[in-house]
């Protein structure tokens, strides 16, 4: 079997629906390679809390974009996009099928859709000047936004300094205003021939799956994993510490919550995250949904493979 030169398969959906296992098994069946589309799986040493694929799954097919960034480093979708698209091009050149797997919708779109993320240097003169202006006169900063991007100013809370700074930067770096970027963002026209498969289950079952998975992560040593990162000489970056499970345990280490509250918060916030994911995915009509309630992995894979053949991805 071989993949056509521009074909990409995407396996997405909310957390705890089994995307990693399905993607790995599909890659083994379809001569494919898996690219993680998870904003936190990029970090080295953050294995338990981000539910990275098991060693057994990693043996089934090549996997990419997992554990290659130090937790002390901030990482952005712009950096991810550049690396991911380079990997996709390489996989396609080798006549294999790229399979994007993950629930970070922004990261999926960063690969398959014509969206740009201007690279911002947090230490640039421009960033430092804007942040200095924000300290001296937040109102002047907002007036600057109104001048360079009137539409953007309407859509941003004048008290959200961080967003205002980023919005001004976006205009200065790209030359495009909010309206232009927004119209392009709303278009879901992939630069590849894509089949996007979404895995979902009934809300009650998903809640149960999430709660059980959190308990399993704790049993597997999540607290120790976070403590090691938290206590390392390099520390853990602002971006990495936002990962579910990690920020809650850090709050526990710093005495803001009890141990029992920590576990319950992880469950609550993971359920809330899954709800936000579904809101994001519902806005994309390209997704072909597979109900995974009560289905065995083999049954799900067979159904997806049928779709892959119907799409014409497999040509021999």
Image (cartoon, rainbow, N blue to C red):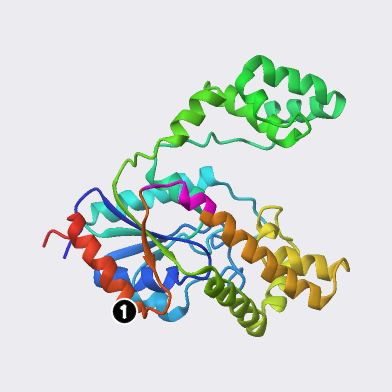
Note whether residue 232 is visible: no
Question: In the rendered view, does 21 fall on the left or right side of 259?
Answer: left
Question: In the rendered view, does 246 fall on the left or right side of 178?
Answer: right
Q: Residue furthest left?
A: 316
Residue 92 or 139: which is nearer the viewer? 139
Note whether residue 102 is visible: yes
Q: Residue at x 45, y 72 (%)?
A: 18
Q: Position of residue 232 (x, y in %)?
A: 74, 67
Residue 199 or 138: which is nearer the viewer? 199
Q: Position of residue 75 (x, y in %)?
A: 59, 50
User: Dot 1: what SS?
Assistant: helix
Q: Residue at x 51, y 30 (%)?
A: 182
Q: Position of residue 197 (x, y in %)?
A: 36, 59
Judge whether 152 appears above or below 233 on screen: above
Residue 79: in magenta span: no
Q: Which residues, given as a range, are shown in magenta?
A: 279-285
Q: Which residue is mark 1?
A: 298
- Pointer 1 local density, CA inside 10 Å: few below 14, some 14–19, many at least 20: few
- Which quarter of the picture shows residue 297? bottom left
């Amino acid at each position: 079997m071989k993949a056509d030169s521009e074909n990409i398969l995407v396996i997405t959906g909310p957390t705890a629906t089994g995307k990693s296992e399905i993607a790995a098994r599909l890659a083994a069946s379809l001569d494919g390679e898996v690219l993680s589309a998870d904003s936190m799986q990029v970090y080295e040493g953050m294995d338990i809390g981000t539910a990275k694929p098991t060693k057994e799954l990693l043996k089934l097919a090549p996997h990419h974009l997992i554990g290659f960034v130090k937790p002390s480093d901030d990482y952005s979708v712009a950096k991810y996009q550049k690396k991911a698209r380079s990997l996709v091009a390489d996989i396609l050149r080798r006549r294999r099928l790229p399979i994007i797997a993950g629930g970070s919708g922004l990261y999926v779109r960063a690969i398959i859709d014509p969206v740009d993320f201007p690279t911002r240097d947090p230490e640039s003169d421009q960033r430092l000047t804007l942040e200095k202006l924000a300290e001296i006169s937040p109102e002047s900063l907002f007036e600057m936004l109104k001048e360079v991007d009137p539409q953007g100013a309407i859509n941003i809370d004048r008290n959200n300094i961080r967003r205002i700074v980023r919005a001004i930067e976006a205009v200065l770096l790209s030359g495009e205003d909010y309206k232009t970027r927004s119209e392009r963002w709303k278009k879901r026209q992939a630069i590849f021939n894509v089949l996007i498969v979404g895995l979902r289950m009934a809300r009650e079952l998903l809640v149960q799956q999430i709660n059980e998975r959190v308990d399993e992560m704790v049993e597997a040593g999540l607290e120790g994993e976070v403590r090691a990162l938290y206590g390392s000489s390099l520390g853990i970056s602002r971006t990495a510490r936002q990962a579910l499970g990690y920020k809650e345990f850090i709050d526990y280490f710093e005495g803001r919550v009890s141990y029992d509250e920590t576990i319950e918060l992880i469950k609550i916030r993971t359920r809330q995250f899954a709800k936000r994911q579904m809101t994001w995915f519902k806005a994309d009509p390209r997704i072909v949904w597979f109900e995974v309630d009560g289905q065995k992995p083999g049954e799900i894979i067979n159904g997806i493979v049928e779709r892959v053949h119907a799409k014409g991805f497999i040509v021999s």
